[in-house]
Image (cartoon, helix red, strand yellow):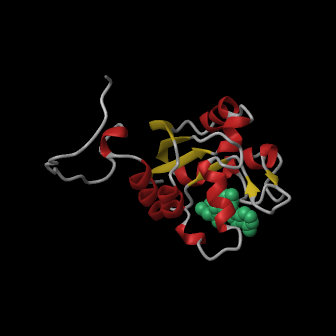
Amino acid sequence: MATEQTLIIVKPDGLIKSLTGNILSRLSETKLVIIGAKLVRVSEELAKEHYKHLKDKPFFDELLHYIMGDVHNTHRVLALVYQGEGAIGKVREIVGDTNPEKAHPVSIRGAYGRITTSGVFENVVHASSSPEDAEQEIKLWFSPFEVVGDIYPTRDVVLEKVKTKVWA
Ligand code: IDP
Ligand code: MG
């Protein structure tokens, strides 16, 4: 089996239900290695790009509000990159079906997910579903310096006049 990387996101419902520890424990069953981890305040731009494959779905706007934390009033998610042999499939198996009611009861989504009355699947975690998706998603959510190891080719650029913040 090939070494793969996969993006996991503990969504706002996972954080607000204090499920982070349980989710990480379940994922540790895979014996995969964490090579990136950070809290992210999801912008509308990031949400739209991450879910662009669903832009024509009737639940798209609600999905954006969900991942941005508007629904749970907690404007952060925990983003992680796991690496190892067959990482994508191993994680998807523990995560379970997209629809929490179809997901195996022992899977993360089966145990903790729900379908809201407005119809969006609040399924606690995101997990990449193919090597192509994983690469696109990891490059969207993480910069090269935020992952440990050279997972994808990089190039050097010289930035000038970049406005940023440092501690005062
Ligand atoms: P995935 O998260 O299992 O890869 P995707 O089809 O990529 O599934 O959908 C992204 C997210 O959009 C899901 O995790 C879920 O929160 C939401 N979603 C997907 N399909 C539906 C649906 O049919 N009804 C409501 N929400 C959905
Ligand atoms: Mg998906």
Question: Splitting the image into 4 quarters, where does residue 21 fall?
Answer: top right
Taking the spot 71% from the left edge, 59% from the top edge, the residue there is 98
Query: Left of 84 or right of it: where is 51?
Result: right
Does the image show residue 92? Answer: no
Q: Quadrant of the C terminus?
A: top left
Query: Left of 85 or right of it: where is 159?
Result: left
Query: Camera-side residue: 31 or 111?
Result: 111
Taking the spot 62% from the left edge, 34% from the top edge, the residue there is 24
Query: Camera-side residue: 160 or 40?
Result: 160
On screen, 10 above or below 99? Answer: above
Does the image show residue 25? Answer: yes
For ligand 2, which image quadrant applies? bottom right
Residue 61 in the image, given as x and y percentages of width and height: 65, 65
On screen, 146 above or below 122? Answer: above
Residue 73 in the image, given as x and y percentages of width and height: 68, 42
On screen, 121 above or below 165? Answer: below
Residue 70 in the image, given as x and y percentages of width and height: 66, 49
Question: Splitting the image into 4 quarters, where does residue 65 fall?
Answer: bottom right
Taking the spot 48% from the left edge, 36% from the top edge, the residue there is 38
Residue 89 in the image, given as x and y percentages of width and height: 59, 54
Query: Left of 139 or right of it: where is 1?
Result: right
Taking the spot 62% from the left edge, 52% from the top edge, the residue there is 67
Q: Residue furthest top?
A: 168
Number of numbered discs overlaid on the protein picture? 0
